[in-house]
Amino acid sequence: MPALARADLETLLRARKLDRTLTTVLPLPSDTGPHDSLAVSATDVAPLDARLGGGLPRGQLSELVGPRSSGRTSLLLRMLAAATARGELVALIDVLDSFDVESAQAAGIDLDRLLWIRGHVVMNPGFCRDLNQRALEQAVKALTLVLQAGNFGLVVFDAADAPSDAIRRLPFTTWLRLQRMVEGSQTTCVLVGGERLARSSAGLTLQLGRDGSGIRFTGRLFDGLAVDARVVRSRTRPQEQADVRVSLSTTCA
Amino acid sequence: MYACLYRPPAPSDVPTPEAESLRSRPRDSEAVWASGGGAPRELKKDDMVSIAREFSPRYERHGDHVVTLDVSGLGRLFGAPRAIGEAIAGDAARRGARVRVALAGTWTAARILAMARPGVTVVERGAEAAALASLGIGVLASVIVTPEAESLRSRPRGSEAAVKKVDAFAIFRSWGIKALGELAALPASDLAARLGRQGPVWQALARGEDLRPLTPDLAEERFDGSIDLEWPIEGLEPLSFVLTRLLEPLSTQLERRDRGAAVLHVQLGLVTDATHASRLELPAPIRDVRTLRTLALLDLESHPPDAAIDRVTVVIEPTPGRVLQHTLFTRATPTPEQISTLLARLGALMGQDRIGAPAAVDSYRPGAFAMRAFGATSSLFTSRGAPPPLAPAASHSLALEPRLSRSGEGCHSAVISALRRCRQPVPARVALDRDRPVRVTTDRRGFAGGMVVQCAGPWRTSGDWWAGRAGTAGRAGGENPVQPVPPIQPVPPAWHRDEWDVALGDGAVYRIFRDRDTDAWFIDAVVD
């Protein structure tokens, strides 16, 4: 009889989806039917969204990591365009002030919905060794303010190509603090860098790189990049780590 | 039910349009003046309004002598309409003024009757045309409502006096029309054919019909407050308490009037007898005290006063309140208050010129852009904006077509390849072989350089040569044989270049260009 009561209770909890605890993994979005737009932020790249369970998770720090010309910015602009198309407000903390408005417009971003914060980090600080450190801390403060304001659908901290020594000198608690700030909100916070920034604080890390076909030229035209995307860390879908590989081939527009 | 108060102008008054029209009409004007019972006491301009305000908050002033008010509902207090009229006249008499009062179902009829008949006149609803029928047609001159008058009505008071005389009376006299009833009985279409659009307007007035609803005047209200401090204060923290004390009643006042602050003025009187003034333009009507105080403090943090403060004055320019309907089915967006506070904080942190919404400019200049104030578009807060087209615009850009490597499923959603701009083009050394780049190197940290694996180009582009001399793009120094380069000119006015897309051995793809005037090479952007 007690065994029967326990089975009934477990069945009831399973039916109410209350059978999970904090120690178990969160339910996969695919398990609950269609992707929940309140839980994920679609990148609008269908194969990537399919593999990521609908897109980048909200309420977590996500990372786009890769070397130069690995398609980070292209994917980023695509995500921003998708977010603004959904009517969301987005913010971009552009650490190196390298955002190209023409590319953004071509990607379809609703520029009115984009809050662009231009940083002061420079590639060549000269003798001012701590110049970039101050500027980077300033950019992190700006990111903090934006996350505190809340209700932005997508917040991007673009530190790609930023001097790695300046990034490494940031306190490691920075990312933990940011993770705590974004937790529970419906904001997707994306960090873009040449290497992983948030480390263990990241919810999802997408490693981008050039695949075997590399860079294509057609006659006198640059055809584009061949990009390989790989999930190297996922808190919500740990079994997908190192398993998702999406290739992005390029053609002329 | 509407009532109209009319105070006949005293002979010493400056001629008004009403008086002018009355004097120009021998018979009617005599009747009006005779019925007035002599020159009334000189009333101040606001006296008529104060009489009307005693009975109804919905009143409209027509010049200095006529006020129309909505007396609907006063029957429960005074009884029959005649009692209402007598109460109004009695109130005016207690103030020492003799006014004419008319009550009718339309405010136009009440106004005409008040102009034409002495004492208290009451006309039942629906009997306005019959009551007006016997009046002389000249009385219409005092209530003429023309499009010109309507436009003038929106101007400051007194401008109604500038209404042009319409010479329709001469036409009516030539037709033998002397009474309003005769005009009201004319065929409307024939009247319009002869007098144009004004014909039906005259006829509607003759029938006592309202051409527009009564537009109540609202008392002009000032939203300001000030505090004289016994002890001067220094620093922003004590000032925040003072600002809160000033802003709280103003916020309540704004809320009562369904208004929000459009502009916030903070004037600080300093001990040096100087005044430190700041002006904050708000992107949306705001009346939240904390938000207003934070914005004012952030602005003062950026521009602090020079000395201690002994007087604080806050003036708010009001604007109609914002109606915001939230929905359960769309994502919440930051409120204007949050955006304003965020922008103020970011402006203080990064600089006002470093934050905003990007905007494309109508130029072929590589990397050209502009910045606008973020949140300037009200649709960001009121409704969901129209989604922009995701199709790529015509530009020198590339598309990424994603596909699954293992499953082989194709996807045709184009991803536009993007550039990362170097705001200051990076000087580079480029080795050429048969006019094509074969090696790119630079001293700039972070750019490795290397052998060119593949390249595409050149694409020649130039512009703004009419505005200045080309050849200074990205020049960090160096000599110029023609004229010296201005030391501070981050964006040169002209460009003339050959652009190349080059893929280097390390896998990076750069957009480089050769300045055709100086023959110098620069890295302009990175394809990413």
Image: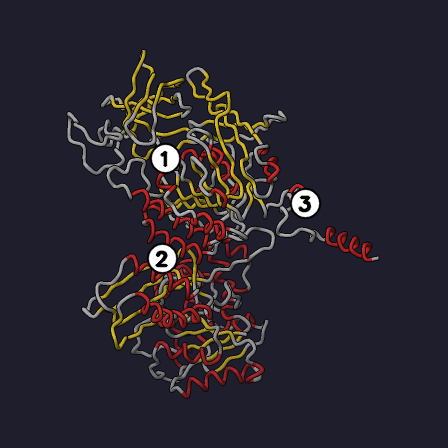
Q: Residue A99's x, y, as percent?
A: 39, 37
Same chain check for tags 2 and 1: yes
Q: Residue B382's x, y, as percent?
A: 50, 53
Q: Amino acid at mark 3?
A: Thr
Residue at screen point 41% across, 76% down: B49
Q: What label sits on residue A32 in the rendered view?
A: 3
Identify the residue under disc 2. Answer: B281
Same chain check for tags 1 and 3: no
- The reply to whether callout 1 and callout 3 are in contact (CB within 8 Å) is no
Q: What label sits on residue B260 in the rendered view?
A: none
Element under disc 2: strand
- The reply to whether callout 2 and callout 1 are in contact (CB within 8 Å) is no
Does residue B158 appear to the left or right of B474 in the view shown? right
Compared with A59, B527 (above or below) is: above
Residue B507, by quadrant, is: top left
Residue B358, by quadrant, is: top left
Residue that lies at the very extreme toward the right in this rendered image: A1
Identify the residue under disc 1. Answer: B362
Question: Mark 2: few, some, or many residues within 10 Å (few <14, many ≥20)?
Answer: few
Residue B18 in view (yes/no): no
Residue that lies at the very extreme toward the top in this rendered image: B434
Element under disc 1: loop
The quarter of the picture where the C terminus of chain B appears is: top left
Distance in Å between CA atoms under marks 3 and 2: 47 Å
Q: Nearer the viewer, residue A60 or A96?
A: A60
Question: Mark 3: few, some, or many residues within 10 Å (few <14, many ≥20)?
Answer: few
Q: Nearer the viewer, residue A11 or B477?
A: A11
Does residue B227 appear to the left or right of A77 in the view shown? left
Q: Amino acid at mark 2?
A: Glu
